[in-house]
Image: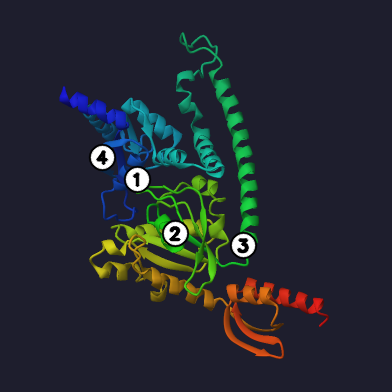
Amino acid sequence: MVEKEKRSTEREAGERAVLVGLTLPDQPVSHEHPLEELARLTETAGAIPVGRLVQRRARPDPSTYIGKGKAMEVAEMVRELDADLVITDGDLSPAKLRNLERVLDMRVVDRTELILDIFARHAQSHQARLQVELAQAQYVLPRLRRMWTHLNREGGTGQSSAIGTRGPGEKQIEIDRRLLRRRIRDLKQSLEAIAARRERMAASRTEFFKISIVGYTNAGKSTLLRRLTGEDAYIADQLFATLDTQTRAWTLGNSKRVFLSDTVGFIRDLPHHLVASFYATLEEARVADLILHVVDASHPDALLHMEAVDQVLEEVGIGSTPSLLVLNKADALDDSLVLRSLAADREPEIALAVSARTGAGIDELTHAVERHIRATQSEAEFRLPAGEGKILAWLSDHGTIVQRAYEDGMVALRVRLGPADLARASRMVEELERKNGH
């Protein structure tokens, strides 16, 4: 009786899920339980992991992912644990999903569907909701037959059809497919328009140096954004807490202002169509002058997380953008060897240990960004009337004044500026000279 009451209370908190995964020969070696990340994803989606089963195989079973014998073992676990659904750590084809559900007589959710559910929960802006809807529609399209199991009427109106199965089920599936394809087309067009607007917004900020924060989900990116800019950013200790790009102004120690953008967190085996759906969100990263790759250095699989992020960056075409490796949560580490190990394959000067929570190492990160900006700047000389305060202030705000000298009402400046700022400064001075008749 007590057990029943306990399970009733658990159900009010969320569905009970049995987690299932495979260990394959070519799979990277993880330092935590193979299903630990899936368990955190499950909890983020609002369900309760009540059982885990991992099978070692040479390859996934072509019919049921885990094989019929192991599927029967899962079915027994489901009954014993009074579970509501089974969640697999791999992406299942429509056929595998259908076959596994038949053997288990239980609803099965694969890794992609689980992530999509989390994204749907966290989508706040119009853009994020459109992106999630597009990803869901692309996922559902090849699985419509499974979702129409109750209308599986392939027999049509033939004599062999059983009572209750005659009707236009197959026709209805085709209608749904057409409607879904049309919706996918409309969503893509809407997101392309949003991407174009974002590109124009990014272009309007070309006079400022742009930095984008990327990293594995829950690495502390939003906490770092808040620490650096002093402005509010949504923070939660859960996976995919941030889906929308957050852009804030960051004033560096030399009083120079740059734009800093947070992005959606990455994750291993992120489905390709999901990455494609979030291209608009990643637009800020695509036009960034510098990437801050934030890593949870305290995580046992930090190296695997770094590789997963690098893979996505390459996929979206920003793998060659200059970057700084930010080893976050360093305060949670007792062994400095871990930090040195994570930075071993990177140039030492671009790997920095910080704690966004405590502020440790933030000054060093700021200085590293300032050094990088200076390295991208060129030196130029300008001679202006001393009364041109607006242009002089602009040069001071956007560049580094190396030398300043006054003579006969004129000021001679030697300034270090980035490529875009140098071009704009040259245009401003040329316009002033034309205006003054020089």
Q: Quadrant of residue 115?
A: top left
- Label 3 or label 1, whichever lies nearer to me, is 3
Choose mark 3 or mark 4, whichever is in front. Answer: 3
Work out whether mark 3 precedes mark 1 in sequence or the reverse, and give the earlier one: 1
Instruction: Using the numbered discs, state the Cα–Cα distance from disc 3 to disc 4 in whole angstroms.
Output: 51 Å
Question: Quarter of the image holding residue 17?
Answer: top left
Name the residue nearer the viewer: 410 or 93: 410
- Of labels 1 and 4, the one closer to you: 4
Q: CA distance from mark 2 to mark 4?
A: 38 Å
Callout 4: 10 Å neighbours few (<14), some, many (20+)? some
User: How much space separates mark 3 and mark 1, taking CA atoms?
Assistant: 49 Å
Q: Nearer the viewer, residue 4 or 394?
A: 394
Name the secondary structure under disc 3. loop
Query: In the displayed structure, does residue 91 sit left or right of residue 276?
Result: left
Task: Look at the picture and state if 282 lies above or below 63.
Answer: below
Quadrant in the rendering for residue 134: top right
Q: Which residue is mark 1?
A: 59
> Sequence-wise, which precedes: disc 3 or disc 2?
3
Residue underneath mark 2:
225
Residue 205 placement, left or right of 117:
right
Identify residue for label 3. 205
From where the camera sits, is residue 75 visible?
A: no
Amino acid on which disc 4 is placed: Leu
Q: The disc labelled 1 sits on which kind of residue? A: Arg
Real-space Cα distance between discs 3 and 2? 18 Å
Q: What amino acid type should be assigned to the residue bearing mark 3? A: Arg
Position in image of residue 57 (x %, y %): 30, 45
Residue type, mark 2 in image: Leu
What residue is pinned by disc 4? 53
Vertical placement of 192 versus 298: above or below? Answer: above
For the point 65% across and 77% down, the residue is 392
